[in-house]
Image: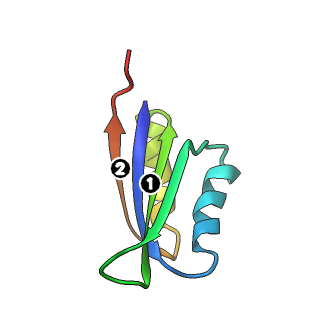
């Protein structure tokens, strides 16, 4: 199942690398990745990640992302795959 993971994180050096490193170290694949500073607060960035995995794997990723020091909030959306 495809999932969209939205991460609000501190706009600090190395923050993006730590998030991507979490995925690669655990063998999770990132299909798409978009990062941009938030309009309201330049010290924060919105990161949107698309990944395919079971609900259990996505729950595990979410818990691990929430443990990262630069991460403020993580939300996930399940997307139905066509066919």
Q: Examine the rendered structure and indicate whether residue 21 appears above or below residue 26.
A: below
As drawn, the label of residue 23 is none
How many numbered dots are placed on residues in this image? Answer: 2
Q: Position of residue 69 (x, y in %)?
A: 51, 76
Quarter of the image with the N terminus is top left
Q: State the colouring used for the structure image.
A: rainbow
In the rendered structure, are the residues bearing label 2 and label 1 in contact, judged by CB atoms less than 8 Å apart?
Answer: yes
Q: Residue at x 65, y 48 (%)?
A: 26
- Residue 69 lies left or right of residue 46; in this view the side is right
Where is 66 relative to 44, above or below? Answer: above
Q: Residues within 10 Å of mark 1 (few under 14, many from 20)?
A: some
Q: Nearer the viewer, residue 57 or 77?
A: 77
Compared across the picture, whether 64 is left or right of 38 comes to: right
Image coordinates of residue 59 in percent, x first then y, are 42, 46
The quadrant holding residue 9 is bottom left
Of the pair 2 and 37, the residue shown nearer to us = 37
State the residue at coordinates (66%, 59%): 21
Rate crowding at label 2 as few (under 14), some (14 to 19) or many (20 or more) other CA atoms within 10 Å: some
Q: Is residue 42 above or below residue 25?
A: below
Q: Position of residue 16 (x, y in %)?
A: 58, 68
Tell me the quadrant of the picture where the C terminus can be found. Answer: top left
Q: Position of residue 2 (x, y in %)?
A: 43, 34
Estimate the spatial distance between the alpha carbons at disc 2 and disc 1, rounded to whole Å.
Answer: 8 Å
Q: Which badge, 2 or 1, is on the more N-terminal residue?
A: 1
Q: Which residue is mark 2?
A: 76
Looking at the image, which is closer to me, 37 or 12?
A: 37
User: Residue beneath label 1, please?
Assistant: 62
Q: Residue at x 42, y 62 (%)?
A: 7
């Amino acid at each position: 199942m495809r999932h969209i993971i939205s991460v609000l994180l501190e706009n600090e050096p190395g923050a993006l690398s730590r998030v991507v490193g979490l995925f690669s170290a655990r063998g999770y694949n990132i299909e798409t990745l978009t990062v941009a500073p938030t309009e309201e607060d330049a010290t924060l960035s919105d990161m949107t990640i698309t990944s395919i995995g079971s609900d259990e794997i996505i729950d595990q990723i979410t818990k691990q992302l929430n443990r990262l020091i630069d991460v403020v909030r993580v939300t996930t959306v399940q997307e139905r795959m066509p066919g």
